[in-house]
Image: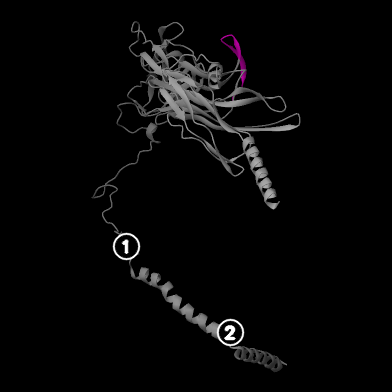
Amino acid sequence: MNLTKSISLLFLILITSIATSQDVKFEAKVSKKKLGVNERLRIDFEMNKDGDNFVPPSFDGFTVVGGPNTSLMNSYVNGKKTYQKTYSYFLAPNKKGKLTIKQAKIEIEGEIYKTFPITVTVTNAVDRPNAPPGAADIADDNIHLIAEVSKTNPYLNEPVTVVYKLYVSREVGIDGNWREKQTPRYNDFWSQNIEIKGLNVQKTKYKGEDYRYVVLRKTVLYPQKSGKLKIEPLVLDVNVEVPSGRTDIFGRQLMNKVPKTVTAGSRTLNVKPLPEQGKPADFKGAVGDFSLSVTTSKTQLDATESLQAIVEVSGKGNMNLFELPELTTPSSLEVYEPEHKENIRTTLSGMQGRVSDTYTIVPQYRGKYPLPPISFSYFDLATETYKRITSDEIIIDVLKGPTAGSNSTTNDTVDSPKQTVTTSGSFAFIKTTSNWVTMSEEKFFKSNLFWVLLLIPFLCIPIAIILRKKQDARNADVKGMKRRKADKLAKKYLSEAKKN
C-alpha cells in the first residue's frame, strides 16, 4: 500500500513539473526570413514569464545597429492574466548568403531555456522589399533631414544660407536623444553659425503630406573661391518611435524604437567669379552694399596736439573679409598705426554693421594741411556692377607752432616738451661711476642650514619617546602621585597661613 502511494505521488509530481515546463515559452521571432543586404532585420526574443540572466546570441554575420530594446506587456482577458516580455535587436547583414542566428539563453524559475536557431537568406541590395514594410521601412519613409540652401550659384563672397531641418510625419515620433554623427565641414568657405534658442516644433507640408519639423542648425557661408564647391553633409543618429500595431491595457498604441541614421546629403554650389570688366584698380574684395565716411575729431589745433581721423565703412556684405582704404597724409603730419575696430552682427541675410580704422595724427608745424579724398570700391550684388565711393577733402588747420624749415627758437616753442642738453667735460647724462652689487647668492639646497633643518625632526623623535616614557612612569606611580598632590596642598595651605 505504501509503495502504491509513493508511486502515485511521484507520478503526480512528474505530471505537475511537465505541465509547469510546458507553460513557459521562450522563442525567437524575426521580421523576415529573406532580406536584401541593404535592409535591416528585427529579431524579438519573447517569453511569457519573467526571467534572469538573458544571454543573446553572438549574431555572427550581422552588425547590431540597435537594441536591446525591452518591452513589457501585462493584460487581463476574462480574468486570466497574460504576461509577455520581449528583447528586440535590429541587425544589418554584413554579407550575402544564408546566415544563422544561434540560440539565446535565459533562466526562468531556476531552469535554463534556449531558443531554436534561425536561418535567414540575405540577397542583393533591393530598392523596396516585396513584403509589407517593417518598422525600419516605416522610419525611412517618415523622417527626413533636409539642407535648405538659399542660393546654388552665388558670386564669390556672396552670402549663402544653409538651414538644416528635420522633418517628421505624424505617423511616427522621435525622442530627444539624437546626436550628430558627422558635423558639416565647409572647406573653401568662411562660415558663421547662427545661435538657435530652443527647438520649436512647427507644422508644414512635405510632399503634400502633413509633417512637423524642427530647425537644427543655421549657417551663413561666404565662398572664398570660384568653381564647384562641395558642402559636406550633416549626419544624425536618431531613435524613431514606430507604431507596433499593439495597444496597452488602456488602448494606447505601443511604439517600437528603431535606430536610424539620417543625412542631409552633400550639396554642391557653382560659385561664379567676379567679373573682370569694369573692375576698379583699387578693388580689394568688398562685395555687398556699403557706404564710406572719413571724419576727424577736430580740424583746428596747435602743433604737438593730437587728433583722430576715422575711416569707416558700413553696410551689408562681407564686412570682415576685405581691407579698408588707407589714409594718406602730408609728410609734416606724424601718423601712427591705425586701431582697427569691428561692430558686426550675422543674420540669415549675411553680415552687416561697420568696420573702421582710427588714425592718431600729430602735426609738428604750423600751417594748413589737406587730407586727400579716399576712394572705396565694391561689387554691388543688386546691380551686379562695381561701384566707387569717394570721401571729401578735409583741411587740418594748425594754429600755433614752429614754422616748417625754421631753426630759431620763437615764443611759439616755449611750451615744447624737449629738454635742453648741456655737456660738462664728458658725455651728457652718463654716469662715470657705478655701485655694483653682487648678484650671486648661496643656494639653500644642501647648505648647512638645509641639513640642520632636515635633521631636527629626526632628533626630536627619540627625545619625544624618552619624555613620553618618563611621563607614563610618573603617571603609573600612584603613591608618588598622592605624595606630590599632598605636598602641593600643604604648600597651598602654608602659604595662606603665612599671609594670615
Q: Which residues are magenta?
A: 198-210
The residue wearing badge 2 is 475
Q: Secondary structure at mark 1?
A: loop
Where is residue 368 shown, x and y percent of the image? 39, 20
As helix, strand or loop, the secondary structure at mark 2 comes to: helix
Is 100 a magenta residue?
no
In the rendering, which numbered label is found on residue 186? none
Residue at 38 percent of width and 72 percent of height: 452
**394 and 466: which one is in front?**
466
Under mark 2, the amino acid is: Asn
Q: CA distance from mark 2 to mark 1?
A: 52 Å
Q: Nearer the viewer, residue 258 or 462?
A: 258
Residue drawn at x 51%, y 82% as measured from the top left: 469
Magenta stretch contains residue 199: yes
The answer to whether residue 342 of the structure is visible from this angle is: no
> Mark 2 or mark 1: which comes first in sequence?
1
Q: Quadrant of the C terminus?
A: bottom right
Q: Residues within 10 Å of mark 2 (few under 14, many from 20)?
A: few
Which sits in the foreground, 103 or 142? 103
Q: Dividing the picture into quarters, in which one does residue 405 lie?
A: top left
* Colouring mode (rainbow / by chain / secondary structure / one colour): one colour
Residue shown at 40% from the left, 70% from the top: 453
Q: Are marks 2 and 1 in contact (CB under 8 Å)?
A: no
Q: Do we see residue 288 in this rendering?
A: yes
Locate residue 21: give its quadrant. Answer: top right
Residue 318, quarter of the rendered image: top left
- Residue to which mark 1 is pinned: 441
Q: Amino acid at mark 1?
A: Glu
Residue 264 percent across, percent down from the top left: 48, 19
Q: Nearer the viewer, mark 2 or mark 1?
A: 2
